[in-house]
Amino acid sequence: MDEIDEDMKDENAPKLLHQEVDDDLPGQGQNYCLHCARYFISMAALKGHFRTKGHKRRLKNLELEPHTQADAERAAGRGSFIQPKRRKIETQPIDDGTFDPKTEDVDMKNPEPVTLT
């Protein structure tokens, strides 16, 4: 979960969503679910995956921020407990073929920022 949280950051997500063609990966590495860290053979399989219970569970699990070393120290009695923050996680947008490397990932960004509650 910590690795997936790293992948979801703004600087890492475009690299994973727009990978070079790799014949060793399913679907040549072009159909990747960022939240589940899985490759799919086709866009239809990826869209079908977005409706599955496993994907929805993963989104729910990613709502809580990952634990840090500071959290571990507070749990051991070296500080005051701070409730973990909840994030609103939505399914990644689908690339509709309008990707332009010059404007890197403009069409894939969510129009509203992720809010912490």
Image (tube, rainbow, N blue to C red):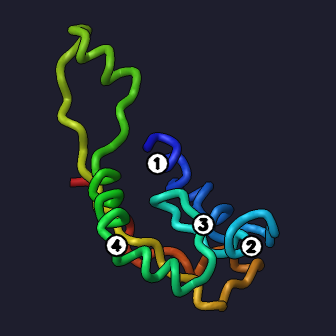
| Crowdedness near tag 3: few (<14), some (14–19) or many (≥20) residues, C-alpha within 10 Å | some
The residue under label 1 is 5
Q: Residue at x 72, y 84 (%)?
A: 100
Tag 4 near tag 2, CB within 8 Å: no
The residue under label 2 is 28
Residue 49, image x and y in percent?
A: 43, 74
Tag 3 near tag 1, CB within 8 Å: no
Horizontal side of residue 103 vs 11, given as left or right: right
Secondary structure beneath disc 3? Answer: strand
Residue 37, image x and y in percent?
A: 53, 57
Secondary structure beneath disc 2? Answer: helix
Q: Is residue 98 above or below residue 58?
A: below
The residue under label 3 is 39
Whichever of labels 1 and 4 marks the residue nearer the N terminus, that label is 1
| Crowdedness near tag 1: few (<14), some (14–19) or many (≥20) residues, C-alpha within 10 Å | some
Q: What amino acid is at disc 4?
A: Thr
Marks 1 and 2: which is nearer the front? Answer: 2
| Crowdedness near tag 4: few (<14), some (14–19) or many (≥20) residues, C-alpha within 10 Å | few
Report how far apart the C-alphas of labels 3 and 2 lie in the structure.
9 Å
The residue under label 4 is 52
Q: What amino acid is at disc 2?
A: Gln
